[in-house]
Image (spheres, rainbow, N blue to C red):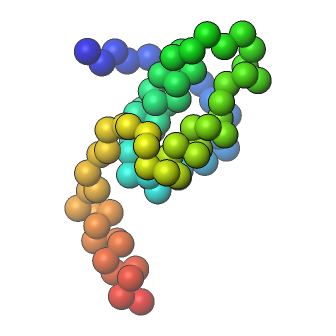
Amino acid sequence: MDAKITLSFNREVIQKAKAFSETQNISLSRLVEFLLRRATADDFRELEDFPIAEWVHQVAEGRAEYSKKPKTRNALKREFFSSRK
């Protein structure tokens, strides 16, 4: 069951995270959920122990599991017309 929370981030971080999640075709919520799931999967003593490099490698190799959101009609239209230029 999903639950809503409110988080505050630096505006630049939010913009970059939104851009990244869009390129991965997932929602920002699912991206944050995936990262939190990874962070809480093991018993990390310090933040520096969190395996960011391992996560990036998993995404690059396609082994990461996350829910994708379908592209909107407007996004598909923009993609189509930008490819025609």
Looking at the picture, how far across and down is residue 6, in whole percent? 48, 19
Looking at the picture, how far across and down is residue 23, in whole percent? 46, 56
Q: Classify residue 35 as left or right of residue 50.
A: left
The residue drawn where x is 52% and y is 29% is 35
The residue drawn where x is 40% and y is 80% is 82
Identify which residue, 41 or 78, lies in the foreground. 41
Q: Classify residue 25 as left or right of residue 7.
A: left
Residue 6: in sight, yes or no? no
Instruction: Using the rendered view, name the quadrant where residue 4 is placed.
Output: top left
Instruction: Tell me: residue 4, above or below residue 17.
Output: above
Residue sitting farthest toward the left: 73
Total marks in image: 0
Q: What quarter of the picture does the C terminus occupy?
A: bottom left
Q: Classify residue 27 as left or right of residue 43.
A: left
The residue drawn where x is 52% and y is 43% is 58
Looking at the picture, how far across and down is residue 5, in whole percent? 44, 17
Instruction: Tell me: residue 78, above or below residue 75.
Output: below
Q: Classify residue 55 as left or right of residue 80.
A: right
Identify which residue, 60 or 25, lies in the foreground. 60
Residue 51: in sight, yes or no? yes
Instruction: Using the rendered view, name the quadrant where residue 50 is placed.
Output: top right
The residue drawn where x is 61% and y is 37% is 54
Q: What quarter of the picture does the N terminus occupy?
A: top left
Looking at the picture, how far across and down is residue 74, in whole percent? 28, 63
